[in-house]
Structure formats: C-alpha cells, structure tokens
Amino acid sequence: MTVLDSTCASSRGLLLNTGNGFRIQPIDIGHPDYGALIDPDTAFWALVKKDQLADALGDGSLLKPYRKKQATCSAEMQTLRFDLKPSAVYFNPTERCNLNCSYCYIPEALRKDGVHMSKLKIVEALGILKEYFGKSVPNGTLPQIVFHGSEPMLNREAVFAAMDAYQDDFRFGVQTNGTLLDDQALEFLTSRGIGIGLSLDGANAQVAGRTRKTWDGHDVSQKVVYALERLKGYPNYNVICTVTRKNMRQLDDIVDYFHALEVPVCMLNPVRCTLPGAREVKPRDHELARYYLKALDRTYALYRKTGRKLVVANFANVLVSIVAPTARRLMCDISPCGGGRCFFAVSAHGDLFPCSEFIGLEAFKGGNLFQGEIENALDSPAFRQVTGRKVEDIEPCAHCAVRHFCGSPCPAEAHEMNGGMDRPGAFCELYEEQVRYAFRLIADGKEDAYLWDHWDSGTSTTIDLGH
C-alpha cells in the first residue's frame, strides 16, 4: 500500500463504517492515481493509491496506527474549535465611508451619515481593551487591533494618535479601501510596521469599477494602484479582491496584475452575502469554482516562472487546515468560526459584535465597550448565537467530510441569506472543490508553492503513516 501523508485534518464522500469504532469516508479528489480517506470527526486524512483503496479499508493496516492516535487528533480539534480565547479586535473608528461598494456588509445609512468615534474615546477604548487582554492573552504575546471599515482613514488623525499612544501594547493593522493613503499616511504606517490591507477588484478600471466606486459612481482604482506601487517591498501588506459575478471571469488577469505589482499576499474572497446588495452580484457556485481554481493554477505557473510567490491567503488557509489544522491563520473556515471566540468587533459607538459582518444587525449586539465588561458581551445571548453554531447541527454539512476544512461559513450570511444559524453558508461547492484541489496539490507535492514561507514553523507531526 502506498500512502503519501497524513495528519489531523477532512473531505466528502460515501460514509463507511469500517467496524473499527470510527468512521472513515473515501472521497474522489479528481487525481488520476490517488484518493483520500478521511475521518470527518477528527479531520484525520490519508492519501491512498486508488487501486489499493479496498485493501486499505479491508485489512486495517492504515487504520491501526491512526486508532492509537485518534484521541490525540480529537483533542487537538476540540481545542481548536472550543478552547481558544479572543486575541484580536476589529475596531471600526467610524461608520462612514467615502465609497458605496455594491456588496458592502455595512448598511448604507451608516456609511453615508454615521458617526466618527472621537480621539479621546478611541484612546479610552484601547485602554479598556489593554486591561482585558492583560488578563487573557499570555505574557509575551501582543493582542491585535485592526482598524476596520467602513473606512478608517476618514478618521485617521484619531486612529494614528491612538496607535502611537499604545504602540507597545498591540499589534496594529488597518483595513482600508486605499483611496486616502497619501504619502504622509503611508510613511506613518510603514515606518511603524503597521499591517495594511487594501482592496482592488480588477486589473483595470473597467473591471474594478463595476462594484467599487464613489457615491457619485466614479472608479477609484488608480488611487489604490498608487498606494500599491508605493508599498512594493514592504513585507506587511496584502490586497483583497472581492470576487463577484462582475469580475470572476477576470481572476486570471487579477492574479497576473497582483503578481506584477509584487503583492506578496492577496485574498480572493467570494462575496459575503449578508446584505441584499451582495446577493445581487453573487456568482453561481459551480461557475465561480471553475474560474477560482484556474486562478490558483495561474499563481503556480507564475511561481514556476519567476520563483516569486503570490499567496492566496484564503485558499492557503484551506490548504493548511488539511496539512496542519492548528497552523491556520484565518478562523472563518471552521465551526464555530472565530467570531466572538478568537476575535470580536467594536463599532464606532463602542457596541460589541462577534464580527464586523454583524455590525448593523442589532440582534447580534452583545453590549457596549464603555458600559460593561467584555466578558459579559462574550457570554451574551447575541454572541452565543455565533459561538454556539456547530457544523454538526447543520444539514447537509453534518454528513460532509470537509466540514472541518469548511465550517459552513459565514454565520452572518447563513442567518441573513438562508434564514438561520442552522443553515449552510453561500458557497458550498466552491469549498468542496478547493478541498479536492488542495488534496491534488498534496498528492503531487506542490503544496509549499501555495503556502506562506515557513508556514510549518512550530508545527509537529501527530501521525506519519509513511510513503
């Protein structure tokens, strides 16, 4: 029997009961030689030669070593899913935005006429957060504050003052549309090593402007490109491309463009369908999967040609959730997701939400930073709606082997688009095809080309079944 690798990780297929006390599901990964075996409860997997699959299941030679480690795998997954504590905050210093992107998850009324949080209140808020994290984050680890949108640079004087006031207490980041990043702002952020996230949805103005535009309908992509050109060589930035039916056919071009700009990390994020505007530009799942995987192929071709990676972080997170589940960097693709569990969001009024995706949805407000303890918000009924959402309670996800690579995201869009927390998210087929694609990469030994450099630093092997 030939087995490539295994670790504590998951995918889709016919449910088998091997008689050995646990469930193993075989899946077709679309590879000419290999299939995968998965225990969906623990996310253990192994790649097996197709012509030896029956033997692998029949004689138990593959499963015996795993059986000895099953409890370890189960404990690792339990810790990852239920035992983590918040260590990051998405902080909205303003409700306003200078853009009117068609798919935005922040309600239009807030983006148009909302409030700024004052400099004094932002500084006060960070003091409260510092005290909270001082009790929950291990010594030597800095919690993270990401100033988020609407558009934080509309309140940049207050944001920059707060960053300087607490520069030794947090790792700071800013997620911005990029239109207000002039030379002075870029100098401030880069000189302090601040993480910067920008947004650009196309390789040219015609495509980028289909969904991202000003209130009077003008494209802003050239301003973003100016910032990207200035950021060449800066190690701590990334670009988000929100993928809709308006730009999915141009994902190849977007990958080429980001690579030419020497962007180190991007995200090709399928549009979150929390609000109706986003649903209007939602791609059909099977069509998006085709263009998405083609774009991933393109990143590999560019890497082979130039030796320089363009890491697609959200796919890399799916891939790393297979090869090393506890090394994942994003917590959207697991259940419960990271909202209210690994991070939470603060609105410009100080209101607390499990995630920025819920800002504007009053049913998910758990309290206020300035009016009560953070611990109370984390344990509020509003937060428990999110932190208690388990994929095992969702149909058909409960029977799917990829459930611990996918997590049936996103709870906000599941609730608003599909009617409840016990419903799937928006892109089931896309996640399934990403998992199959990831297994094909592993079978061919290509996975490192799609992952961050040194992604496996600090990891260890739970099971190695040999080759």
Image (tube, rainbow, N blue to C red):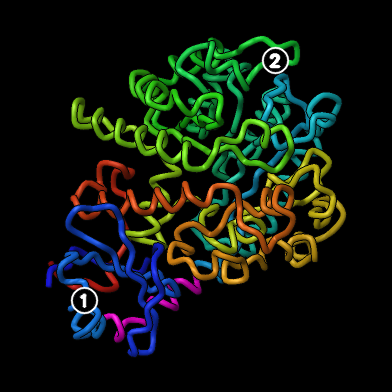
Q: Which mark is residue 54?
A: 1
Question: Would you say the magenta stretch is mainly helix, strand or loop?
Answer: helix
**Is 73 inside the magenta-drawn segment?**
yes
**Residue 355 drawn at (x, y percent):** 68, 49
Q: Amino acid at mark 2?
A: Thr
**Residue 227 falls left or right of residue 367:** left
106 lies above or below 25: above
Circle 1 Cα neighbour tier, 10 Å, few/some/many (<14 / 14–19 / ≥20): few
Q: Is there a contact, CB below 8 Å, between mark 2 and mark 1?
A: no
97 relative to 209 in the view: left or right: right
Q: Position of residue 194 (x, y in %)?
A: 52, 33
- Viewer-nearest residue: 391 or 156: 391
Q: Is residue 383 above or below residue 348?
A: below
- Check disc 2 and report its element: helix, strand or loop: loop
SS for callout 1: helix
Q: Nearer the viewer, mark 2 or mark 1?
A: 1
Q: Residue at x 54, y 38 (%)?
A: 284
How much space separates mark 2 and mark 1, taking CA atoms?
59 Å
In the image, is 167 to the left or to the right of 32?
Answer: right
What residue range appears in magenta?
Answer: 66-79
Q: Residue at x 32, y 51 (%)?
A: 438
Q: x and y percent of residue 366 in the render?
A: 80, 57
For the C terminus, the image quarter is bottom left
From the viewer's side, name the closer residue of 415 and 53. Answer: 53
**Label 2 Cα neighbours within 10 Å, binned few <14 / some 14-19 / many ≥20:** some
Q: Quadrant of residue 70?
A: bottom left
Identity, as a three-letter code, of the amino acid under mark 1 = Ala
Label disc, if present, on residue 337 of the rendered structure: none
Drawn side of residue 126 relative to residue 226, left or right: right
